[in-house]
Image (cartoon, rainbow, N blue to C red):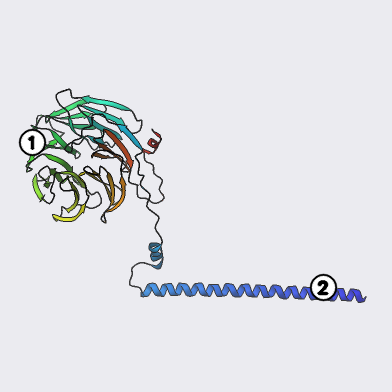
Amino acid sequence: IAATTNSNITSASTTTVNTTSNAEEQYIFNNTMETWQQMNQSTQRRQMLEESLSLSPLSSASHRLLSAPRKAAPKIPKSPFKVLDAPDLADDFYLNLLDWSSTNTVAVGLDSCVYLWNALTSQVSQLCDLGPDQTIASLCFNKAGTHLAVGTSVGVVKVWDIAAEQDVNTYRHHTSRVGSMNWTHNMLGCGSRDRRISLIDDRVSQETTPTFLEAHRQEVCGLKFSMDNMSLASGGNDNKLLVWDIRTNSIAHRFAQHRAAVKAIAWSPHQRGLLASGGGTADQTIRFWNTLTGRDVQVVQAESQVCNIAWSKSANQLVSTHGYSHNEVIVWKYPSMQELAVLTGHTQRVLYLAMSPDGESIVTGAGDETIRFWHVFSKGIAGHKSRSKLSGMSQIR
């Protein structure tokens, strides 16, 4: 009986201790949760008070988001993802022998012939051969990529239907080579060594006399329509950069700060009226102009001949190609003009430049008789996987 009694007492004591221990744990837990809730409520009240007293229009959450470390910008590959041989590619600063259509076809002028390279299939075809009496001086696709304008060394301009592979229009309005061209939707601008610019409406008969713009004193070697097609920028071997009002066919601005030929011209797709231009060997600068006010915005020393300029379609960046003496390609961040990448590989002047339809890649041509494809820009959307049609080309060669 004593043993049984002692066992029952021991069991009862154990049960009492366990019950007390559980009660204490529950009390500590409840007390901890209550304290945490009070602290959380206090923090929320403090944040609300700070926001109500702050002069900033941004919430604290927005401030935290803005102060969070940014993802590093994607690195630009230093090597081209494809190289093609281009025999007889002229080493001439005043020509424009390379273009890339909206349908992903690259055109290149080699001596008297025009060749087409399909970026999707890598197939090469010859579009035309002008014969022994003339050579290719310039190339330019229309916006739809269906037609290619070809300027020649004798001042003739031919427009070719790419699908039909035939010449559909021939214009004989210039007396010397046509080294620069640019399209709007229905108008083709042609710059010539005869110092004139012709504006050809492709909807009218080829016998119709075009509108002529005359102000340059030497060869017109650069030509670009603005994004809204209301202005035309022209660069000449007279070191002048002119901005024309297409509605009145008159000069809106005349810039004379460059000290060498102005071939490199590009309108910003991000800021209305912002124009970039580059000078030749005796100048070696890239200048930015506000064509709405007529003011010189910024000047950057490039330290070599500026042959071409092109803006990124998705980011405030641009790329320039250079001749004497570095023969390089430079990617810049605007407006700081920080060098994001310097791309080398060409052994002679990088005279020709065109951009892919997706805006991510460029093709460059040089007097070393090669054309090189580079990936220089991204779409600018964080976490977005590129769907470039050119992504498969990295497996070639």
In the image, residue 181 lies at what x, y percent?
A: 17, 37
In the image, residue 319 lies at what x, y percent?
A: 27, 46
In this view, the residue in front, 173 or 265, is: 265
Which residue shows up at 21% across the image and 46% down it?
304
Which residue shows up at 33% across the image and 72% down it?
55
Q: Amino acid at mark 1?
A: Asp
Mark 1 nearby-residue class (10 Å; few <14, some 14–19, many ≥20): some
In this view, the residue in front, 239 or 250, is: 239
For the residues labelled 2 and 1, say whether their Cβ atoms are less than 8 Å apart.
no
Q: Is residue 41 visible?
A: yes
Report the disc number at residue 281.
Answer: none
Report the disc number at residue 11.
Answer: 2
In the image, residue 13 lies at what x, y percent?
A: 80, 76
Report the disc number at residue 194.
Answer: 1
As drawn, the residue found furthest toward the top would be 131
Q: Amino acid at mark 2?
A: Ser
Q: How many marks?
A: 2
Counting residues from the N terminus, which is met first, the one under dot 2 or under dot 1? 2
Quick one: SS at disc 2? helix
Q: Quadrant of residue 157?
A: top left
Tell me the quadrant of the picture where the C terminus can be found.
top left
Quick one: SS at disc 1? loop
